[in-house]
Image (tube, grey):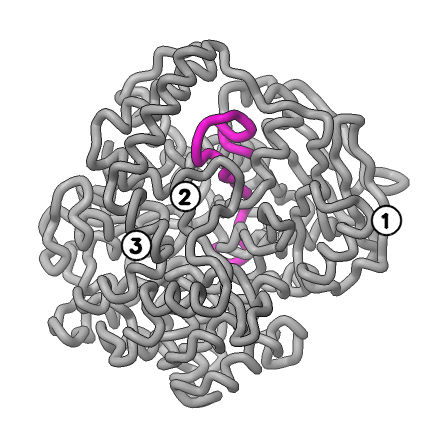
Amino acid sequence: MDTILRIDVGAKGGPKAVTQPVGPYAGLGGRAMTSTVVCTEVPPDCHPLGPENKLVIAPGLMSGSAASTSGRLSVGCKSPLTGGIKEANSGGTGAQALGRLGYAAVILEGERPKGDDWYKVVISKDGVSIVKDNSLRMLPNYDLVERIKAEHGDQVTVISIGTAGEMRMANSTIAVTDVEMRPTRHAGRGGVGAVMGSKGIKCIVVDPEGTTIRHPANPEAFKAANKAFVEGLKRHGVTGQGLPAYGTNVLTNILCEAGGYPTYNFKEGRFPDADKISGETQAQIEIARGGLATHGCHRGCAIQCSGTFVDKDGNFVTKQPEYETVWAHGGNCGISDLDAIARMDFLDDTYGLDTIEMGVTIGVAMEAGVIPFGDAAGAIRLVQETGQGTPLGRILGAGAAATAKCYGLERAPVVKNQAMPAYDPRAVKGIGVTYATTPMGADHTAGYAVATNILKVGGFVDPLQPGGQAELSRNLQVATAALDATGFCLFVAFAILDQADTFQAMVDTINAMYNLSMTADDVVALGQDILTKERAFNTKAGFGPAQDRLPRYFSRESLPPHNVVFDVPEKELDSVFAF
């Protein structure tokens, strides 16, 4: 991947595309690419929806190759939700298609012309075309993809925004189509869809027809390392058994048992009806109805943690709702109806809304008395209002923090204005450190301490005690930043943390691809470099130690059943990035 595609949306006569050598960004991929471009080219004090912000879409270093489980796509910008730097990560077919076409990044930049025109970008081996197409205006993602499929066929990738992105909501995603060409995979967090909307780009169609898979510099070494890597993924209990059988929702029963499953807007640590929405129950329902409990979001995935959820008549509803989605719209809101949760997952995907932010926002609205906890029909209506942009929907679409402010509530479970995911930081203290300190706002994927606190992957640090949590989070944030640069799925971390030979096989695969001699120390240095850049951007954007904190009520209100508070000392939070 040796080319960067820049699209100047403010060019005279309409958006213009220019390709250029990767230049100073050579050797970067995924999050390393997006964060470096944002840190280099975006003023940290700019308005996220202003012309100075840029949207960077970058496949990982290994995307488009035969490397297993390497189809992740990074999207970066200054976040409309957090006000800091953002990298949102997506599966689907986008990274592989862009990688095979040779693009290291696509950058949307400039000031959208006056008016309300919307544009479609088409990228293929023959070049780039940008077409004004106002017939796409306010189409939800599923309707948009059907329109694109009729015009471009069913072998392309669509990277798009739904209605939420067009309305520039702070909770808006960028959708990426999966292998069935459904808009089910999302760069979900931080409002990246609003930035795409601010540039007037409704969708990017990527057509890899006529391209070949990217070839490694050392084919024999690559083949051997890739084989060993896949064997390691298959051998591990999480990546080889738990995730393929039950998807990410396998975590519902586990977190409830641990007392760290946030329920009723983070008031309790266990949901009494967890068995009704667990991964085991979900898989049984999917199989009984003729859906799929095991499925990959892109070709070449060795883990296959996704699935297909169908209704009682066998009709497609949505992709298998992820653990975070089932929790956010389920236990967090007191809802135990998987069909209602699946309906909300579909609506989130088609409108282009982050399921975590949306579910937490509904939980806040429930606490405010807008609808009662457990009201599934009311929750569906709130998602619809958000996607339609009603006055109430505009408030909800601004996220959990804004909704709490509008209703006069303190209890907004957010950091840097971004909603916390499905692990209560009082009962899983390592993830609490990650929530507090990551440059991304509350984000479990930034340093998944749940692996070690709860699943005992990569060792064990007692989730209920403050000791050792800052070091755990630090090490995982460094490793994750590096992994996000490669295009490998974050879930490979379970195997590489526990199995040294699997980690080495992954590194060997990268080395064989690029004829490198990278070591474990180089991986650490890459992660530290990415985090250092991101932290520097946020500092210039006005962030300081006060923003690296959880809301105070997490230190004041104890969480049943363990009756614990978040008590990791502030000096330890401030030490996380002292590498």
- Categorize mark 3 by other alpha carbons within 10 Å: few (<14), some (14-19), many (20+): many
Secondary structure, mark 3, is helix
* 518 relative to 404 in the view: left or right: left
508 above or below 483? above
Q: Quadrant of the N terminus?
A: top right
Relative to 220, say whether 5 is above or below: below
Most common secondary structure along the magenta stretch: loop
- Residue at horizontal 35%, vertical 46%? 446
Visible in this render: residue 115? no
Q: Which mark is residue 132?
A: 1
Whole-percent x, y for residue 15 in the image:
81, 40
Amino acid found under the numbered disc labelled 3: Ala
- Between marks 2 and 3, how big is the CA–CA gap? 15 Å
Q: What's under tag 2, amino acid-wise?
A: Thr
Residue assigned mark 3: 436
Please report whichever mark, 3 or 1, sits nearer to the chain's N-terminal start: 1
The quadrant holding residue 64 is: top right
